[in-house]
Image (spheres, rainbow, N blue to C red):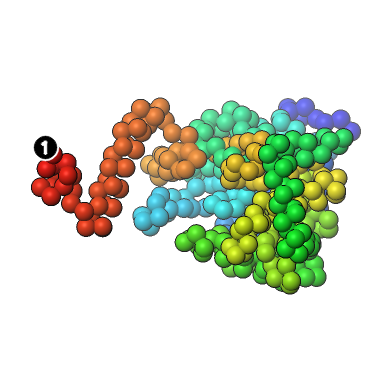
Amino acid sequence: MPTPCADERQHPVVLHGLPALEAIREEWDALAARTGAPIFSRPAWLVAWQRHLAPVAVPELLVLRDGGGALTGVLPLARMSRRLHTRIPIPVRYLAIAGAGVGSADHNGPVAADDATATTLFEAAAGLARTTSSTLYLENLAPRWADLARGATGGTITRRTDCPAAERSADRRFADAWSARMAKNVRRRQRLLDEEGVTARWVAAGDGFEAALGELQRVHEARWNARGGTGRLSGLRVALLRDLATQCRFPDVPWILLLEREGRTVAALLGIRTGASFSVFKTGWDPAFTRLSPGIMAGVIAMQWAESQGLTTFDYLRGPRGHKHDLGCEAVADVSIVVPAGISGALLEQRERFASDGVRPDWWNRVAPAADRARRTASAAVARVRHGAPPPDHPRSGRAAHS
């Protein structure tokens, strides 16, 4: 059946809640498979996300069908909020893509049969926000949808988030794109792993997954604790991943790679297989084995496994790192767009602009050098006070005496 023209399409309808999601789940999954949508735009992720990370964010599904009743597009939305600052407990509310948010999904957007369908869904999202005087925040949109979303909503780009990914054609290997230095280092590191008796084991969703997830959480926390920080794999996210494993259908499920030595987990990596892609979601390693570069080697072994499975995309998701470039990954920038409503929307827009990967206005580029100098000067002054050193203009300081 030919795809209907834009003027033959039906208007999107809004369906509320997880029961409505379940009613169209099979159609949604089938459309996602045909269009190559990432895991984060599929029902399995949305269900697990809503249950564990955002239980009060009731999904509002924009659903579009053609004249024959066939599903052609879905854009999941939800009412969400976040603080303007960690020290300011004032929540800003907005209408967002369901499944997105801090530490959640990348490559967001609609599941759509074509660009015209996606445009209609973005226009409907902007209209829904206007009718409720809400700010619309389309966070971490996949590059494919960025221009369409901006044109359809009139929004402003506030952030660009790098998500390094490696692509290969069916007749080539991922290793063909590695730098010469990386290829040499991989061979050396693999010899070290072999000498230490480190072996690789894969665990898919199902039997053994719970135990493997526990090992991932342990080494993930150990890695961050060794650096004086806290991990990003809380009990809620462990519960989300456990639930996601039950929501997905084999082989497109979460997989955990365990690097083990004498029964002890040296490193772990969790990735999600979806279609022809493998997306790295969480990693961790035992600091006692840092000399073996277990984090890098877990990525290398996972990339080699993905290739053996016939997958053509290896996606590290958000977080630029030098070694990913050496592994043939190109920077793919997700884009965040805000359509502000009222003062709270304007504040949210500025908050996101000044995030670590935010797109800052031109005036900031002019004052940033002076601001950086002032910050360094203030930090140095604080450090001197903490260590009991006199300030620069104190009579006991070398500078004052020389003057």
The residue depicted at 26 percent of the width and 57 percent of the height is 387
Tell me where residue 290 sits by quadrant. Answer: bottom right
Q: Position of residue 215 (x, y in %)?
A: 67, 68
Name the image quarter holding the C terminus: top left
Image vertical order of residue 174 relative to residue 232, above or below:
above
Instruction: Give neighbour class at mark 1: few <14, some 14-19, many 20+ (Cα, 10 Å).
Output: few
Nearer-the-camera pick, 204 or 198: 198
Position of 150 with respect to 70 (left or right) is left
Residue extending farthest to the right is: 1
Residue 321 left/right relative to 2 = left
- Screen quadrant of the N terminus: top right
> Measured from the top left, where is residue 251 in percent x and y?
83, 56
Of the pair 149 and 21, the residue shown nearer to us = 149
Q: Is residue 16 visible?
A: no
Q: Is residue 263 or residue 43 the one in the foreground?
A: 263
Q: What residue is drawn where x is 63% and y is 43%?
A: 323
Element under disc 1: loop
Residue at 70% across, 70% down: 264
Count of numbered circles on the image: 1
Disc 1 designates what residue?
Answer: 403
Q: Left of 279 or right of it: where is 378?
A: left
Q: Residue at x 57, y 53 (%)?
A: 103
Q: Where residue 178 sits in the image (x, y, percent)?
A: 72, 38
For this rendering, which residue is in front, 381 or 319? 381
Q: Amino acid at mark 1?
A: Ser
The image shows residue 321 at horizontal and vertical percentages of 59, 43
**Displayed quadrant of residue 355:** top left
Asked whether residue 93 is in view, the answer is: yes
In this picture, is 249 found above or below 178?
below
Quarter where residue 116 is shown? top right
